[in-house]
Amino acid sequence: MARQNVRYAGVTFSPSTHEFSLGIPFEVYFSGLTKGRLRVRAEFGVEIRWVFDIVRDLPDILSNRKRAEYTLAVAKEGIHDGVIAMGLGGGEVGNPPERYAKWFEKAREVGLHSVPHAGETVGPESVWGAIRVLGAERLGHGVRSVEDSELVEYLAERRIPLEICPISNIRLGIYPDLVDHPLRRLYDAGVPITINSDDPPLFNTTYNDEAKLLSDPFNFDINTINDILLNGVRHSFLPAEEKQSLETLFQEEMTKLRRELSLSLFFLLRISYVSWTQHSRICTFCFDLMGSRRFQRRIGNSPLSSIECSFWFVCSGSLHVNCPCIHMV
């Protein structure tokens, strides 16, 4: 996370899986979680809080109840050591949120936040149930809310954010491809959205991979991208002072990065004395690294000539000496 410039993460953890499936007791796994949380804070400057989730798709009803009770008990026990919320994971099909009302009610009574998964593999009815019965303050996934215009309006009016994980949605077949993904439609309708990575190793993704999608294919401009990324802070469950401090830090970093990018573009144009050409061949590596289509829209429709391309790399401090573009004049 530190390598991706993550500074805060609300991480979902399934206590019942460790206790009942792996035989690891609370004292062992929570001690490890706590030591790890303190270490990454001290060594990498990353703050972590925990969302303990109920795994709901066990076929045996009694086992489901037992695990829900256990999850609530250990979440309450860890509330002063980083546990901030109760989640609801596992398969939605055949496991509506309404079944878990009493555990979420008890969790909210002791100050835990409500963050169930809903509206991923089941439609809007799952989201309505999570909101009306579980008191959802934020929703894991929630993308299928787009199928109900009244629900979309409700989410926008009540400012209930969605934790959207585009690559996970594609991997699981919720949508055939990113072109059909409703992230853009939900945002345009005024629904607060955050960008998330779901389970990175399982879905072969990273937070940065997900964030890059905001530019392509979702085609947001840089101001909107920054705003969506900052939603991760605004809709976190951090105390108000920590939220403000973190948002200020990110805004300063974003301003600095934009200034550095502007300077790079300025020097690129200053030192480039070869006129724009209709040269249509440019290597994929250089085309991608330059900023590709976005850069060309700002400058013109003609691709860079080979010499201009090489100037970019000198300017950005990463000369790609073996680039085939150098031989394309």
Image (cartoon, rainbow, N blue to C red):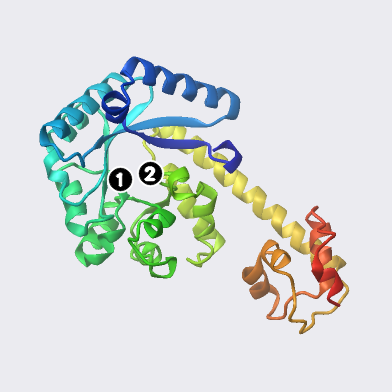
Q: Residues within 10 Å of mark 1 (few under 14, many from 20)?
A: many
Residue 240 location in percent, x, y? 40, 34
User: Identity of the amino acid at label 1?
Assistant: Arg
Q: Residue at x 20, y 29 (%)?
A: 67
| Residue pointed to by mark 1 | 138
Q: Quadrant of residue 323?
A: bottom right
Establish if 153 lies above or below 329. Answer: above
Q: Residue 182 at what x, y percent from top left?
A: 36, 65
Q: Quadrant of the N terminus?
A: top right
Front of the two marks 1 and 2 = 1
Q: Are marks 1 and 2 in contact (CB under 8 Å)?
A: yes
Q: CA distance from mark 1 to mark 2?
A: 8 Å
Q: Secondary structure at mark 2?
A: loop
Q: Earlier in the sequence, mark 1 or mark 2?
A: 1
Query: Looking at the picture, does residue 20 appear above or below residue 208?
Result: above
Q: Which amino acid type is marked by label 2? A: His
Which mark is drawn over residue 235? Answer: 2
Q: Secondary structure at mark 1?
A: loop
